[in-house]
Image (cartoon, rainbow, N blue to C red):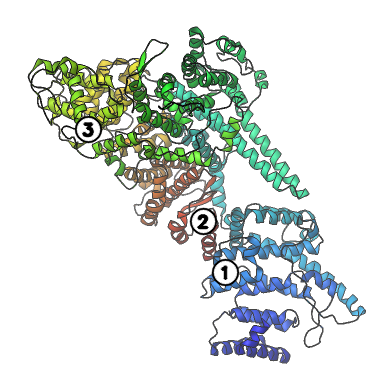
Amino acid sequence: MELLCKENGIWENVLELTKNAQSKGIEPLHWATQLSSTLNSAAVSLPSIELAHLLVSHICWENNIPITWKFLEKALTGKLVPPMLVLALLSSSMRTMNKQGLELGVVKNQGNSKSNAPPGAFRLYMELLKRYAFSFKSQIHDPNYQKIMKSVDEILHLSEIFGLRVCEPGTLVVEYVFSIVWQLLDAALDDEGLLEQTPEKKSKWATTLQDMELDGDDSFIEKATEHHDRLLKLNSVMAVEQIGQLLQNKITSGLLYLAQKNMPSHWRAFVQHLRLLGANSSALRSSKLISPEALMQLSSDMQKVFSQESRTPLQKEFCAATNSGSLTYSAGLCHGATSSAIWLPLDLFLEDATAGSQVAPTSAIEDLCGYIKSLQAINGTTWHDTFLGLWFAALRHVQRERDPIEGPVPRLDTSLCMLLSILILVIADIIEEEEASLMDEAENNLTDQWCDKQVVGRFIFCEQSLFGGRCGTLLFLAYLPCILFPSAGNLRHLIVEACIARNLLDTSVYFWPGYVKGRINQIPHSLPGQIPGWSSLMKGASLTASMVNALVSTPASSLAELEKIYEIAVNGSDDEKISAATILCGASFLRGWNIQEYTVRFVTKLLSPPVPSNYSGSDSHLIGLAPSLNTLLVGTSSVDAVQILSLHGLVPQLAGALMDICEVFGSCVPDVSWALPTGEEINVHNVFSNAFILLLRLWRFNHPPLEHVMGDVPPVWSQLTPEYLLLVRNSQVSSGKTPKDRNRIRKLSTPAIPSPTQPIFVDSFPKLKLWYRQHQACIASTLTGLVHGTPVHQIVDGLLHMMFRKVNKGGSQTITSGSSSSSGPGSEDASLRPKLPAWDILEAVPFVVDAALTACSHGRLSPRELATGLKDLADYLPASLATIVSYFSAEVTRGIWKPVFMNGTDWPSPAAFLSTAEEQIKRILATTGVDVPSLAQGGTSQATLPLPLAAFVSLTITYKLDRGSERFLNLAGPALESLAAGCPWPCMPIVASLWSQKVKRWSDFLIFSASRTVFHHNSDAVVQLLKSCFTATVGLSGSPITNNGGIGALLGHGYGSHFYGGFSPVAPGVLYLRVYECIRDIMFMTEEILCLLMLSVREIAANGQPKERIEKLKKTKYGTRYGQVSLAKAMTKVKLAASLGASLVWLSGGSGLVHSLIQETLPSWFLSVHGPEQDGGSGGMGAMLGIRTCILCSYVWNVCLGSGFGIIRFCELDGGVYTSVAVRSGYGCIKETEQGGLRQWNEEELALALLGRSGIGAMGAAAELIICNE
């Protein structure tokens, strides 16, 4: 700096001016005026970085006298130098000097006069720190702000010490404040000889000692020592008090909060030093301003300190109102806005995950783990209470499904899979993660003895808490009354056995009070050998027919038994492989909850066997495994089986295996057949069809493109395409297995089939890719491209002759593809089924169906003949049903076919059941207030359907409802419902009536499906349904179910006619979960949810009172009531409404909708709604509660997306609501969309939570936001 001054004449003049003023004793104000004039004349920008360097260098330490400190203070007051830079320079110079003052005595200055020793300088530094360490706002608006902070960084070596790559000025401010506090802390420790007890044994801020020239004799030094000793003690007390001020001040505590969240390793080291000071400092105990306990409390959570300063007594009361109350649970319907209702999102998640309307590409275990962690933090509950909430949500779900209606929907097996397998794996994973986290924390802190005790103590406490959550919840279940299910025995025993199988409990639970009472139909985990079939297998018995039947009907009770069967399926004879595959797809797959996670993986692996090392054939090795592969495909084709695979997250792997099977078997000519042990013969067409139908059920292949592009945000299910499934599968392969998966694999004693390691793409399957392109083209536009004389044209004509051979024989006109026609009867040879590869047949099917439908529309083919011909085609190649579905779905949307009369003569008539259907639909929708249009079109008109829909429903009716047809109807059924729902009302009720006449036991399911289409055609009905959901849940006035609200009112008992002697009203939540997937404009739905959320909150605040009454009501003396509403009760309902709104949007639109909500919808809502109440309604509380509840919802979604943690609290402020949110995960986009608005509304605490958790990249913006609220 001295060299710099010599090079610059202006700074030489400044130094000379200062020295002259110093020697003559000129007043500091006069000096500052002269200095300012000199600098302005030289066009020096103020505050000046160079001047700060010069003045501090001049003082330290040859001119360490009072007048030079006064000069410096006047320069700071006159804004001639930047305060942060001056304090940084002084702190750098002050390092170790307070201690040196006692050792070195006095310092000689240029005037050869005695000066104050460094302890005096340290005292003056502390005074400047008091005045200027808390003011940042003016400094960040300085034009030289970035240059100043860069200089501060160079002086204190902040970037080097903290190791942050981001060097934004705001980030450097955080590091600067952190360093100032830390330097004070280390100085205080050093003064008391405690610094050597730190793990580092020294301060990271220590530098080499300044060279000092000593002067004076020993007697003088001895006299000075006594004074310095007193000053040193005072400085130590002042330093610890200054640390407390920095930790407590609103601005600096906010900046330190950012350091705590974004520099955790440094913060832990800082807290170690602070704890050492708190435990041993005599200066801290001597302070009258701060105690050791208060200092430690301040450092425990800087966000709490930051938020506490502006909190009023009314806010504290409001927080207490929202957080008070013990948790009470009910496994029943859970009516009322009780504490159990805080777990409403879990009930909705479980209900949606097991609905069966779609499969998920991700594991329900992973999704539910993130959901549970979020809710645990949001609700602020212990793990014990969280696990209880999870248990009872699952029990409520099973209870709703204990007597399900019949139909192609998941039944009790899927619900029990969620309760007894998925849920327990979720709990096991959470416990494993928490214990690993605690162990890591303990290991990272073993270097400090005092801290070690604290960490180990916390570990023991958390371990006990986790064990309480693990065992205590189950012990609580043990005392509950027995919940009996006809098909499952005593549910408590099933839960306990499933927990024992995952090592969550040991067999000591058998001695729980009352545990042995009741009926047990599943053998305890410790006694697997008592099941005759499995015990015989383990002793080496062969797989006879009777043995196979026993093992199929009884689930394996141990992993060893399952591995035995798996080994047979891999290495046994051909017949043994078929038997083993049959067993694996039996009860062990559907009801083997203790080992289900292994069964589903074994089955999936068996569907993608590797090429044997000794295989030398020219065909694919899969051909030789056709019988066992077909057995696996049939065994996993049920609705429950597919849903169980989806819950375990195996859909992407299953899709990859099925694509390979389809590619191989679809390319083969069916000239070879295989005989199964049942006597059935299969060929490559059978294997291909079973694989192809199952593959298509993994995504909504038949939906038209319109449903993929409507609105700005696509529905969640629209992501499920073959490309997306393979993308997820490849991601899983490339990233390797998770630690949890590896832990489960280590339990296997039998070597598993090697997992695939290479990515696969749709291009890997050229035949499948060709069909997929044709399928997309068929949906997007009318059918074209059939050229006369080509192989495809010949196949089309051959298939038409096969389908309509009897029609062709009976007349002179032959049904053809339209490109050519031939007169006369067809030959008998033409009726023989052609032996063609399945892919070639599928390529021709759209043209075949188009020709048949055209012939029917022109009267050349009767409806009965059309249905019979299509059935013959589907019997010939069952996979052709998929192409028939896609063709009919596309043609209906085009609207070019005339409707046909369902009169009972040409087409089947629904008249016998239609009036009953109308009555039952009205009863189902009774709770929603939605008007059901009359099913009699125009009053007297006959029922009509579009020709493609009429043809399709006629085709499906020709199927027998048996096990052989079930897997094909599982594809055709949902497609028929989707097709009918997209047609004008009342097409779906007509279809439901036709099928109800055929299969009466499915009538409940069919009528319920028909009732859902009311919402497809009427957006107002959707709004009314959403309103019913909020009204029922919150318990607002006008709810036809109950005025108590809660989970029971929202979800009720499920649906069906088996209650109350006939169809009962279906709960609105169940209706919505079955409807939202078919609503294409989900952005409209989201906006309506936000509107209804605000209206609900406003009504909660008003308690249903009229406006006139509300205006007269005043708050009570203590502010615990508003409009005669208990504050605690109102906030419970507000949180319940917010939870409902958040869950509905999250389930409806997923992450895409959440991003859109935060980036677009919520900011516009804030701008339009914020302001004084305009309608004279319930006052500011209702509107502001609504706005802040919208913010709450955005955080709930945010937390769920990040699988992170969040804590949400409400605090009431007179005239509005102040929300305190500490979110432990955040979006980077929040920085862009929310910062300005939140700053404008003085929601600094909320904004800090957002930006503080958005990572290092957002720390600078967060720091500036805090400073701007100074």
For this rendering, which residue is in front, 1092 or 223? 223
Query: Does residue 61 sit above or below 604 in this rendering?
Result: below
Task: Estimate the x, y position of residue 46 in percent, counting from the top left.
Answer: 55, 81
Residue at 78%, 84% (x, y): give it.
109
**Separation (CA) of disc 2 from disc 3:** 48 Å
Which residue is the site of mark 3? Answer: 983
Q: How many marks?
A: 3
Left or right side of 681 for 391: right
Task: Estimate the x, y position of residue 592 in percent, counting from the top left.
Answer: 52, 20
Which residue is the site of mark 1? Answer: 136
Quadrant of the frame with the C terminus: bottom right
Q: Earlier in the sequence, mark 1 or mark 3?
A: 1
Which residue is the site of mark 2? Answer: 1251
**Quadrant hosting residue 1063:** top left
Q: Secondary structure at mark 2?
A: helix
Does the residue at mark 1 contact the one at mark 3 (Cβ under 8 Å)?
no
Task: Estimate the x, y position of residue 393 in percent, counting from the top left.
Answer: 50, 30
Q: Nearer the viewer, mark 2 or mark 3?
A: 3
Left or right side of 348 for 1207: right
Task: Estimate the x, y position of residue 1139 in percent, counting from the top left.
Answer: 46, 40
Q: Secondary structure at mark 1?
A: loop
Q: Nearer the viewer, mark 1 or mark 2?
A: 2
- Residue furthest toward the top? 546
Query: Does residue 494 sit above or below 531 in this rendering?
Result: below
The disc labelled 3 sits on which kind of residue? Cys
Q: Nearer the viewer, mark 1 or mark 3?
A: 3
**Quadrant hosting residue 746:** top right
Q: Earlier in the sequence, mark 2 or mark 3?
A: 3
**Separation (CA) of disc 1 from disc 2:** 19 Å
Q: Earlier in the sequence, mark 1 or mark 2?
A: 1
